[in-house]
Image (tube, rainbow, N blue to C red):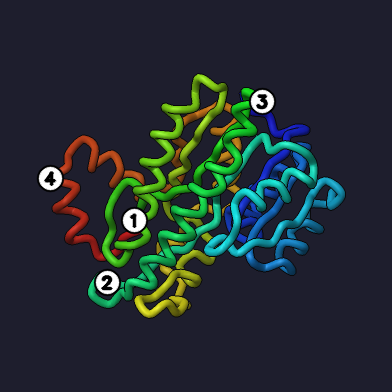
Amino acid sequence: MTQLKNSVVWITGASSGIGEALTLQAAQAGAKLILTSRRESELERVRQATGVPDRVAVLPLDLTAFDADDAVRRAEACFGPIDILVNNAGWSQRSKLVDTSMSVYRQLMELDYFAPVALTRAIVPGMQKRKRGHLVMISSVAGLIGAPMRTGYCAAKHALAGFSEATRAELWRDGLKVSVVYPGYVRTQIAINALEGDGSAHGVMDPLTDEGISPEDCAEDIWDGIADNEEEIFMGGKELMYVRLKRYAPKVFSFALKRARKVT
């Protein structure tokens, strides 16, 4: 089992939403934490909210343009080698293919795919030497199904799932674990912060996102799954039906998705 107590945990996208909830719960469980996002002031707010700021370090980074090897060195200078890396930072999207600029597609891939790949690649050699470590990739139901208005987001999350599965197959003999998390609707700012086709913020809360599970419930499910060394961790509501439908009745899934009024 992967234990949080006394583990060094690095969480990206830690300034809000799922990342913030993961941070608060890990702090309560006795972990030492490194928090990363672009917004230093928000990271500091979360750090203080843990109630144990001496066990929490803040490492602001723009994960769309950074040196991963340097970032790992700086993170490990805080509390020592990283035991658990949670690749949580990401953007979503709300635009049709024909309305989306290539620069937006590249932004989505840079943060949602290339950043986790870069951090994982930089941190794995140390974990291999120690013969332990847990890599956690926060994907999405959109990493398993293709949803309209999310072409770039789905592509990045599908890529992350494939990368994670291949990485797991390479590293298990070294004692490393890889978990991929597939949340459905979670009540965060993901829709509001999602990118429009021109790169501007969507600025609107999706009704189904607003009705989703809380970040706290999501984080609890994630940590429970990590403790049990689950390779795939799912949480959400009725939207998970689409995942099962695609697997067991792909033609029915395609028919339903193309006619759905509301999608993830």
| Residue at x 42% of width, y 68% of height | 206
Query: In the drawing, does residue 99 fall left or right of residue 213?
Result: left
Mark nearer the N terminus (1 vs 4):
1
Q: Which residue is mark 2?
A: 96
Describe the element under mark 4 as helix, strand or loop: helix
Mark nearer the N terminus (3 vs 1):
3
Disc 3 + disc 4, Cβ < 8 Å: no
Q: Which residue is mark 1?
A: 154
Q: Amino acid at mark 4?
A: Lys
Tell me residue 36's x, y (percent): 66, 56
* Cα separation between marks 2 and 1: 12 Å
* Of marks 3 and 2, the one in the foreground: 3
* Of marks 3 and 4, the one in the foreground: 3
Vertical placement of 110 versus 198: above or below?
above
Describe the element under mark 2 as helix, strand or loop: loop
Say few, some or many: other residues with alpha carbon within 10 Å of mark 4 (under 14 / 14 to 19 / 20 or more).
few
Describe the element under mark 3 as helix, strand or loop: helix
Q: Which residue is mark 3?
A: 130
